[in-house]
Amino acid sequence: MNLSVWTEVAPHAPVLLRGLLINIQLLLGLISLGLVVGVVTALIEVYAPRPVGIAAGAYTWFFRGVPEIVLLFLFYFGLSQFGVPVSAFFAAVLALGLRSSAYQAQIFRGAFQSIPHGQMMAARALGLGRLRAIVHVVLPQALRLSLAGWSNEFSSVLKDTTLAWGIGVVEIMRQASYIRARNFTLTLPIYVTVALMFLVLTYVGNLAIGLAERKLRVPGLEGQR
Amino acid sequence: MALLRVENLHKRYGHEEVLKGVTLAQDAGETKVVIGPSGTGKSTLLRCINRLTEPDQGRVWLEDTEITSRRTDINRVRAKIGFVFQDFNLFTHLTALDNVRLGLMKVRRMPRAAATGRAMAELERVGLAAKANAYPAQLSGGQQQRVSIARALAMDPKLILFDEPTSALDPELIGEVLSVMIQLARDGMTMIVVTHEMGFARSVADEIVFMEGGVIVEQGTPDKMFRSPEVPRTGEFLRKISDLYGESR
């Protein structure tokens, strides 16, 4: 690869970035969905009566056990089959988000279980109901402890957004393949560019999480760093 | 009428019956010290009073509220009963001030400023106003226990239950906690204290309750219990425990 190749790639950068913006939107959608559903699933697994806990366990087992690309197809083609018209983007957020929730539930569950039971008792003894004790005492600690594991999940799902290519979301990989189709000599430089863009994103994301971790740190409550 | 009445309380864990029918009454302003060998149901008794542990049988009243009734809002009752744990159980992620303020703001719905004022006053009372912004991990065991006492006091409890409050402390930290408790007793706080600290029992208890095997063996004033117990086993236990823990404090 000589220098001239890169000057040929440069004009395509805006298109790639437009694709990357879709990946970022996918990421924000799926990780938020995964966070909310993941916390709730973990709460159910730790605190709910056994049958409900088992159902939550089955849920995480399913979403951790099925390949992501299969989940994408199931949600995209499956939902429309049942008469629920979904856009490829929405199907991708749903499939990847629910999958991420299963992984995030594992992270949060461990964190919930690591909060000493005595603190829960002390909260109950003050007159806080069970749910409010969890919200005010267990959750703030568990979320802090989860940050390290969560940054791992973040890096992982950030890259998984490229799988949405498989169901036709016009994200960065789709844009890259369009460019490549028009000029095969750019194949390698284009994908190197995509790789670099993800490296930067991962770096920035983890930097932000690291900052949050430092800002939220409390003496005596150290996460696994 | 007694402030607290406990009637025929039973609790069983598996095959073992930890409480085999405990009955007692406590007047407002009274300090009761519960003693006895470990595993005889003293902690279980305290936990059954505010139903942190659900008793199998028996009734508990706080004034005219039956705590053990299904219809009673247990959270409202618990807000009136302070509980001090052996291992403090402070909330790790909150400063001393926030530990004391949490119940005021979230249970009693006190506005932030008022809660802060009240919490600072309680920290002052246990001699820790200067540590208001310290996290539990930055405090010694004795300081943590004093914060947990302030946390209980802030709720304006009608009664405070102490579950071996000094058992997890290094010997040189016990005194600071006991002196706070002695002051509370003298100020007229109603307290039930499970402890082995005989010096404390002798100096502030209105009544000593000796429990063994899930029942109350004997109860009476410190004078009677130390000098002329009716049950030989009471005297034997008190002599042993006094040798072990001393009475100097």
Image: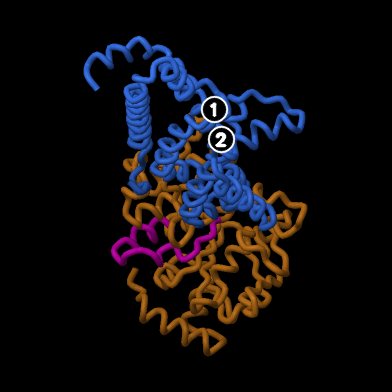
Chain colours: A blue, B orange
User: In the displayed structure, would residue A97 be above or below residue B147?
Assistant: above
Looking at the image, tell me whether mark 2 or mark 1 is earlier in sequence order: 1
Res B133 quadrant in image: top left
Q: Measuring from the top left, give residue A88's x and y in whole percent.
A: 61, 25
Q: Secondary structure at mark 1?
A: helix
Residue A209 makes an appearance in the image: yes
Q: Residue furthest left?
A: A3
Tag 2: Cα neighbours inside 10 Å, few (<14), some, or many (≥20)?
Answer: many
Determine whether label 2 and label 1 are within 8 Å by CB: yes
Kindly identify which residue carries mark 2.
Answer: A97
Tag 1: Cα neighbours inside 10 Å, few (<14), some, or many (≥20)?
Answer: some
Q: Which residues are magenta?
A: B160-181
Q: Measuring from the top left, give residue A139's x and y in whole percent.
A: 51, 43
The quarter of the image holding the N terminus of chain B is bottom right
User: In the displayed structure, would residue B243 be above or below residue B4?
Assistant: below
Residue at x-position 54% and y-position 49%: A123
Amino acid under label 2?
A: Gly
Kindly identify which residue carries mark 1.
Answer: A29
Residue under mark 1: which chain is it in?
A
User: In the displayed structure, would residue B198 be above or below residue A222?
Assistant: below
Q: Secondary structure at mark 2?
A: helix
Q: Is residue B56 left or right of residue A42?
A: right
Mark 2 vs mark 1, CA separation in Å: 7 Å
Question: Of A39 and B40, which appears nearest the observer?
Answer: A39
